Image (spheres, rainbow, N blue to C red):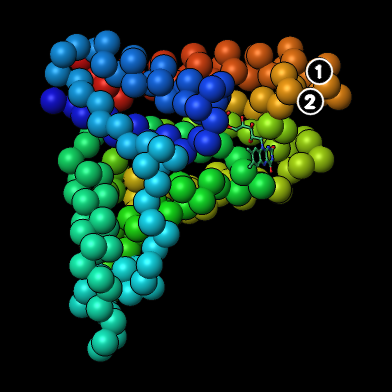
Amino acid sequence: MPTLLRLDSSADLRSSTSRTLTGVFAETWQARGPGHPVVERDLHRSPLPHLPDAALHYAPRLRAEGENPVADAERVQEELLAELSAVDAVVIGAPMYNWSLPSTLKAWLDYVHVLGTSVPFDTDDQPFAGLPVVVVASRGQAYSEATENAGDDNAVPPLVRVLATSMGMAVTVVTAELTLAERIPAMAPLAGKARASLDAATERVRELAATLGGS
Ligand SMILES: Cc1cc2nc3c(=O)[nH]c(=O)nc-3n(C[C@H](O)[C@H](O)[C@H](O)COP(=O)(O)O)c2cc1C
C-alpha cells in the first residue's frame, strides 16, 4: 500500500497556494486506487513545540553525559521519525515567510534531522535514502536567477540541504511564484505570470503524484 505523508505549514487557511497544491497532489495520489492512503500532518493547525533540547539533534549514543532530553520531547521525535519511516513518499507545503521557512516547518526539520540516527555521522546509516519528497514552494515574489531577488531564497535551500544532501531523500521542488500579484495592487500587471506559474505547478504536482503513486 503506497502511503503518502502530506505536510502543510501555511498559516493561510483561506487561500493558500501551497495547501491547494499539496491537496492536488494528495487527491491525485488517492485517485490511484483504494490502496493509496494519505497521512496528513498540519504543522500550522497542530504545531510542534520548538526543539526544546539541543541533545535531540544527536543520536542517544552521541549525547554527552547529563544530556537527557525530557521524555515528552523524545516521544515527539520518535513519532515523527516513525511517521517518515512508514510512508512511501512525502509532499511538503513550504511557503516563503520572510525569505525563509515558516517556523512550524523549521521545527519539524529540527526534529527529524538527527546526527547518527537519520543522517550518517559515525556510521553510514541513512535510513531515509531514496525516499521521494516533493517540496511545494509558494512565494509572493519571484526568485529565479534572472530576477533582482536571486539569492534571497532561504526557504528551499535548507530543505534541500537537510532532506536531500544530508538525509539522502530524492527531493523534487515545484514552485508557484508571484502569488502576491492578486493582493498587492502594484503587482497586478504580474497576474498573468502568476497564473501561468500556478498552472505549471498544478500540472507538475499531478504528474509527480501519478508517477510516484504508481499503479
Ligand atoms: C509572514 C509572511 C511573510 C512573508 N514573507 C515573504 C517573503 O519574504 N518573500 C515573498 O516573496 N513572499 C513573502 N510572503 C508572501 C507569501 O510567500 C505568499 O503569500 C505565499 O503564497 C505563501 O504561501 P501560501 O499561499 O501557501 O500561504 C510572506 C507572507 C507571510 C504571511
Residue 59 in the figure: left or right of residue 27: left
Look at the image and tell me whether residue 36 can be seen.
yes
- Disc 2 marks which amino acid? Ile
- The residue positioned 31% from the left and 68% from the top of the image is 56
Q: Secondary structure at mark 1?
A: helix
Among the 4 quarters of the image, the one containing residue 42: top left
Q: Nearer the viewer, residue 32 or 16?
A: 16
- Which residue type carries mark 1? Ala
Q: Which mark is residue 188?
A: 1
Point 72% across, 19% down: residue: 182
Is 37 above or below relative to 192? below
Residue 48: where, in percent of width, then height? 37, 51
Mark 2 vs mark 1, CA separation in Å: 7 Å
Displayed quadrant of residue 26: top left
Residue 146 percent across, percent down from the top left = 77, 35
167 on left or right of 83: right
Residue at 30%, 24% (x, y): give it. 212
* Label disc, if present, on residue 184 of the rendered structure: 2
Q: Using a 10 Å C-alpha cutoff, classify the residue at mark 1 as few (fewer than 14 neighbours), some (14 to 19) or many (20 or more).
A: some
Q: In the structure shown, which secondary structural element does the residue marked by tag 2 occupy?
A: loop
How many badges with numbers are in the image? Answer: 2
Q: Residue furthest right?
A: 186
**Which quadrant of the figure shows ligand 1?**
top right
Q: Position of residue 105 (x, y in %)?
A: 45, 47
The reply to whether discs 2 and 1 touch (Cβ–Cβ < 8 Å) is: yes
Horizontally, residue 212 falls left or right of residue 215, namely right
Image vertical order of residue 91 relative to residue 166, above or below: above
For label 2, count other residues whose C-alpha is less than 10 Å away and answer few (under 14), some (14-19) or many (20+): few
- Residue at image position (24%, 12%) is 32
Tell which tag, 2 or 1, sits nearer the viewer: 2
- Is 198 above or below relative to 50? above
Tell me if residue 165 can be seen: no
